[in-house]
Image (cartoon, grey):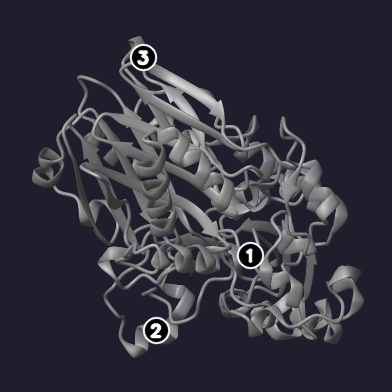
Amino acid sequence: MSLCHERPDHPEEACAVFGIYAPGEDAARLTYFGLHALQHRGQESAGIAAGDGKSVMVTKDRGLVTQVFSESMLASLEGHVAIGHTRYSTSGGSSSWDAAQPHLSAIDETIIALAHNGTLVNTNRLRTRLLDLGVSFRSSTDSEVAAKLIGHFTQKTNHMREGIRKTMELIEGAYAIVLITPDALYAFRDPNGIRPLCIGALPDNKGWVIASETCGLDIVGADFVRDVEPGEVIRVNADGLVSEQAVPRRSHALCLFEYVYFARPDSRLDGVNVYEARDRMGRALSREAPVEADIVMGVPDSGVPSAIGYARTSGIPYAEGVVKNRYVGRTFIQPTQALRQRGIRLKLNPLPSVIAGKRVVVVDDSLVRGNTSKQLVQMLRDAGATEVHLRIVSPPIVWPCFYGIDTDTQKQLIAATKTIDEIVAYVGADSLAYLSLEGLLACCPAKTPGFCAACFNGEYPVRLAEQQQLGSFCASLEPRFWPEEHAGMTPLFDLM
């Protein structure tokens, strides 16, 4: 339950994963700190599973990392190998304890635990096949389907990595997965590399760490080694780290929105520093969409680096126009109706002394539904802003994501149903401009070419069964909103 009754104007990430193999170390405690660093990627539930060489134990629940774990809980998770997970649900709902991760499963007498960032797009078909084989499920998540598939094939082959490889041959979509047995850590990534996953080494050869972002390595003192390659499976045990290309690589398609919003600014993705990329986005947007104004402000937190870049390039002074309450996040306590009506003020409060009488440029990472932007513009006008110009450092989001990001259905995406002039009128701004896709790509010079930009251009790297029926809704949009190959298909939102 969000504090605000309106959903935010940026997409919500699915989750984060963390894994560690470190003999002689308190693996669960290090995982706890790793999850702390990755908390921004999911705030609905958290969990840690640890292996002590004989068995695997898990503790998980709804809530933030600090709400779920206590000293006594961490002390009970003994072992030298562990994985952790923070979750924002996009598949399988969030109300069930069983939907929280890591998932526990059994392969004969061996307990395994699995944690997954991403979304599988062929879950229903695979679940049906497993049910026909007599496999039972405790949740509706695609992550449990992956765990059960691995168990099924490992039993048949008597080899864990072979079980993972055969599973990777069947599952489709986005996945960055960590898995433990009582004495080993495994990690594997989808063949397009849509969701990020990296490898770090603890000092003095004390062990290995796997994390969704490099900030998860930094907090436990691990040195970044490299990214897990698309289609690669990693195993770490007493024999060290081994790697194999489990399935062939496909066209590289790291989610472009990682740079815009999801990743922490102190992380590096595919060789690119996220803070520097966001600074470049602001600079590029200033060149593409200049405006006469008195101050530039960013919407905390992800909009701030871009706002600073916009200000430096435009010559317009940067100012903190709003203060963020950093202790307001997702909560399961419902606010009163009066608080609910205050909406955005629960998280942001304006500084009238900075804003009053000023023409303000507001830089934000994205504009998805328009509800929060509308509240923000009105809040700034109430604080005395004479003009409010919205500048968005990503292109218009006109297609939903099926790979682990919650962007709602297409008809709920404001840029898919309204022109820029109509959006300006809806949110009450004086002007609105987006960074072009070409401009955004130029700001993210990754070592490996290729990104998933499906939410911007409708070009999905993993073909969906549903894409064969994309719907007549496409035909109702202006041609600039959709690729020609999608014309005359069934609406995506009718299939959700």
SS for dot 3: helix
The correct choice, above or below, for 192 with respect to 402 in the image is: above
What residue do we see at 38% from left, 41% from top? Answer: 154
Residue 432 location, quadrant: bottom right
Q: Give the residue type at disc 2.
A: Arg
Which numbered disc, 2 or 1, marks the residue closer to the eye? Answer: 1
Q: Give the residue type at disc 3.
A: Pro
Q: Which residue is mark 1?
A: 401
Q: Give the residue type at disc 1.
A: Cys
* Gap in angstroms between the C-alphas marked 3 and 1: 38 Å
Q: Nearer the viewer, residue 311 or 196?
A: 196
Q: Earlier in the sequence, mark 3 or mark 2?
A: 3
Residue 340: numbered disc = 2
Residue 387 percent location from the top left of the image = 73, 73
Q: Residues within 10 Å of mark 3 (few under 14, many from 20)?
A: few
* Gap in angstroms between the C-alphas marked 3 and 2: 48 Å
Residue 338 percent location from the top left of the image = 36, 88
Residue 203: numbered disc = 3
Residue 361 location, quadrant: bottom right
SS for dot 1: loop
SS for dot 2: helix
Q: Residues within 10 Å of mark 1 (few under 14, many from 20)?
A: many
Residue 464 percent location from the top left of the image = 68, 65
Q: Earlier in the sequence, mark 3 or mark 1?
A: 3
How many marks on residues?
Answer: 3
What residue do we see at 38% from left, 58% from top? Answer: 144
Q: Nearer the viewer, residue 20 or 329?
A: 20
Q: Residues within 10 Å of mark 2 (few under 14, many from 20)?
A: some
Left or right: 200 with respect to 106? right
State whether residue 220 appears in this view.
yes
* Gap in angstroms between the C-alphas marked 2 and 1: 28 Å
